[in-house]
Image (cartoon, rainbow, N blue to C red):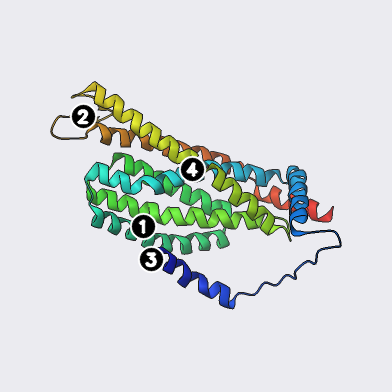
Amino acid sequence: MITAVYFAIFAAPLFIWFREKGENRKLLTGENVFSTAIQRLKKSFQSIKNHREFVKYIIAFLIYNDGILMAINFAAIFGAVMFGLDQQQIILFMILIQFTSVIGAYISGWIADKRSGKAALVIFLLMMIGAVVGLFIVESVAGFYVVGGIAGLALSSVQAVSRAMVGALAPPGRSAEFYGFFAVAGRTSSFIGPTIYGFVAAEAAIFFEAQGEGASFLWFKLLEGGGPFAEQLGQRVAILPVILFLVVGLLLLLRVNEKKARKQIGETVSA
């Protein structure tokens, strides 16, 4: 209920005051909404080869976004397992993330305007990678909260600029179409990262449990009655795929050429 009210309050200004500038396209004789949608989808797939930079960007987004989703979905679980956070502490942690997310969204927008969307994405992906590495090594509740604040700053920035990049890479008049590709691609792949995290965490915990007292992972050791337990070690191991997804996504993003993308858009429009 609280979530529904939250969305209603912040969506209301858009519905009340926003007016679309475009005119509705009338359907021709013999056309219907379904057939028109199919034809446009077919045209989109046929023309996508002319927008290779956009395709490269979407591939990079799918990979680093899975890393983002892993961090979002399992942050509270990590805190509860690693540091024994209760419900109130977890709520405070999530509020901290939301607060820093607002700040991050404004900062990333400013950087994107001053430099470019890609530059802003690179900066905040690096920040996110740093936060996740910090999550891997942190051993105190205070440190966990600090890392969470940094992650919140990066999370909203990456998500906001990622959406803005789609608009920058879309040809005039086809923004909704390209945003559709972006949304569908993100949703259809969103299960991959969290599934990998859960699988790695569970299997690693089973492995360390079988090793018994004295089992270790880097400088973390499984001790009877103190120190990290098998499940805690499993959570730390599962952070490694998060880092991998973010790093690979960042490397692929670096290969996206915004100038070339704008040139491809110009060629498509002139054609």
Q: Is residue 254 visible?
A: no
Q: Position of residue 192 (x, y in %)?
A: 49, 38
Mark with earlier residue (2, 1)? 1
164, above or below 138, in the image:
below
Residue 6 found in image quarter: bottom left
Residue, x 37% and y 53% (percent of image)? 150
Residue 227: image location, x then y, percent: 18, 35
Residue type, mark 4 in image: Asp
Q: Are marks 4 and 1 in contact (CB under 8 Å)?
A: no
- Whether residue 85 is visible here, answered yes or no, is yes
Count neighbours of disc 2 (C-alpha within 10 A) and say few if under 14, some if 14 to 19, many if 20 or more.
Answer: many
Instruction: State the separation of the CA atoms marked 2 and 3.
Output: 41 Å
Amino acid under label 2?
Leu
Tell me the residue that label 1 is attached to: 97
Picture residue at 33% right of the left edge, 57% below the top: 94
Query: Front-most of 126 and 23?
Result: 23
Q: Give the structural element (helix, strand or loop) at label 2.
A: loop
Tag 2 residue: 222
On the image, which quarter does residue 200 sit in? top left
Kind of residue sitting beneath label 1: Ile
**What is the spatial separation of the Cα atoms under label 1 and label 3, in whole angstroms?**
17 Å
